[in-house]
């Protein structure tokens, strides 16, 4: 009799504790849901550039025209969710905190300064790595450490793109020393791997104006822009393979053996000017699972080309499987059923123009951040 009472009392206590825990969870659920209201109720919701509102929401999280046209050229998101942005002309890195608890950055603070034209950012193993003109920095807890101080540079196109391999090796892309010329310098217009003591190995050559490097589908990809009017070079991206020559400036003077399809695995329209790239991670936007996001900065000609954020998918061999215009997107016009092309969207004010996209980054949970000229940063979130 005594044993039965003890068993019943124990069962009763387990029931009470379980009910208490479930009650707490039910109380917390509305609080979490309140942090992510429906799209139409979000205070910073944007309707342009056009996106597919059936898949995601777009919000303006930062707008600071005082930083200038190239205000935030490089983005990265830490494992703690903090967004970082480079201001190359000011030599500064900014961090953006979430002051109101809505899971989006809103308050800028100076994170590092006095740097040599910081441009490319990547978060790795608890620290922010930064590529400057001739310098690679590592920043942890606001302390700036110079890792490499003699990256090939000096005139010509900017160095852009930075990766850290699991063994700590640093990979970066460097710009060519000049345009429409045949001048070649060791380490310029190339993809380099630094393994220590300032020494580098050349992985690939023949780049002109690389926009970014990205690790995607167990490979390294680099993008590049061709000179205006080039017949055998195109804007595009390709997997980096040991010893590959992407053709600049060799193919400008000698077209033999320089077929476009051999030089670019994925080609874009001439003068699209690909810049930032990011491999999608997280699960906040299911439609982007497995995608490679690419920023097309755009041209300055009479006919608009670029001004777009693309999502691409490839197979294991690096061949393009499909592409999707993430922003602006004119695939669906409910009123007429018509499809607007990218140039038309931009000219009618439903795209980026006259501003131009710069870089893209993805947070651990899967939000997509996009920097735009004149100090704008947008966020794409799931519904």
Image (spheres, helix red, strand yellow):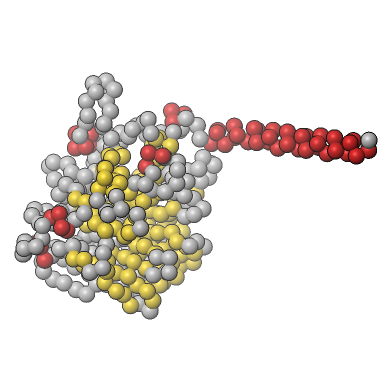
In the depicted structure, whether residue 63 falls above or below residue 27: below
Spot occupied by residue 233 in the image (x, y as percentages of width and height)? 13, 56
Spot occupied by residue 367 in the image (x, y as percentages of width and height)? 43, 44
Q: Considering depth in this image, is 131 or 213 the residue closer to the camera?
A: 213
Residue 60, image quadrant: top left
Q: Which residue shows up at 23% across the image and 21% down it? A: 336
State left or right for residue 243 relative to residue 219.
left
Residue 130, image quadrant: bottom left
Q: Which residue shows up at 22% across the image and 75% down it? A: 186
In the depicted structure, whether residue 136 falls above or below residue 350: below
Spot occupied by residue 262 in the image (x, y as percentages of width and height)? 15, 58
Q: Considering depth in this image, is 132 or 238 the residue closer to the camera?
A: 238
Q: Considering depth in this image, is 278 or 151 the residue closer to the camera?
A: 278
State left or right for residue 17 relative to residue 115.
right
Question: Which residue in the rendered view is the most extreme toward the right?
Answer: 1
Q: Is residue 160 visible?
A: yes
Q: Which residue shows up at 42% across the image and 48% down it? A: 281
- Location of the C terminus by quadrant is top left
Q: Which residue shows up at 22% across the image and 29% down it? A: 339
- Location of the N terminus by quadrant is top right
Spot occupied by residue 226 in the image (x, y as percentages of width and height)? 16, 56
State left or right for residue 297 relative to residue 255.
right
């Amino acid at each position: 009799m005594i044993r039965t009472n003890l068993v019943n009392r124990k069962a009763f206590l387990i029931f009470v504790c379980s009910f208490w825990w479930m009650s707490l969870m039910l109380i917390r659920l509305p609080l979490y849901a309140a942090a992510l209201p429906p799209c139409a109720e979000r205070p910073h919701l944007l309707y342009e550039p056009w996106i597919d509102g059936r898949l995601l929401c777009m919000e303006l999280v930062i707008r600071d025209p005082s930083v200038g046209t190239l205000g935030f050229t490089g983005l990265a998101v830490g494992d703690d969710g903090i967004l970082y942005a480079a201001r190359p002309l000011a030599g500064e890195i900014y961090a953006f905190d979430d002051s109101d608890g809505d899971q989006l950055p809103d308050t800028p603070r100076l994170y590092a300064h006095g740097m040599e034209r910081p441009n490319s950012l990547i978060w790795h193993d608890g620290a922010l790595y930064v590529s400057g003109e001739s310098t690679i920095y590592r920043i942890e807890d606001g302390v700036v450490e110079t890792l490499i101080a003699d990256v090939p540079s000096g005139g010509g196109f900017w160095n852009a793109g930075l990766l850290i391999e699991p063994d700590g090796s640093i990979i970066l892309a460097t710009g060519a020393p000049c345009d429409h010329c045949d001048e070649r310098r060791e380490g310029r217009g190339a993809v380099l791997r630094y393994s220590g003591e300032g020494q580098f190995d050349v992985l690939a050559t023949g780049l002109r104006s690389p926009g970014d490097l990205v690790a995607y589908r167990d490979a390294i990809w680099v993008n590049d822009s061709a000179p205006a009017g080039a017949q055998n070079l195109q804007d595009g991206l390709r997997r980096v393979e040991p010893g590959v020559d992407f053709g600049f400036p060799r193919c400008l003077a000698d077209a033999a053996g320089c077929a476009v399809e051999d030089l670019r695995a994925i080609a874009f329209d001439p003068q699209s000017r690909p810049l930032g790239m990011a491999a999608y991670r997280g699960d906040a936007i299911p439609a982007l699972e497995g995608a490679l996001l690419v920023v097309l900065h755009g041209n300055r000609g009479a006919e608009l080309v670029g001004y777009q954020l693309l999502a691409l998918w490839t197979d294991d061999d690096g061949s393009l499987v499909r592409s999707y215009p993430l922003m602006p997107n004119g695939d669906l016009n409910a009123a007429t059923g018509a499809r607007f092309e990218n140039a038309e969207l931009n000219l009618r004010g439903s795209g980026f123009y006259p501003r131009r996209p710069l870089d893209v980054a993805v947070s651990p949970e899967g939000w997509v951040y996009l920097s735009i000229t004149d100090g704008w940063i947008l966020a794409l979130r799931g519904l």
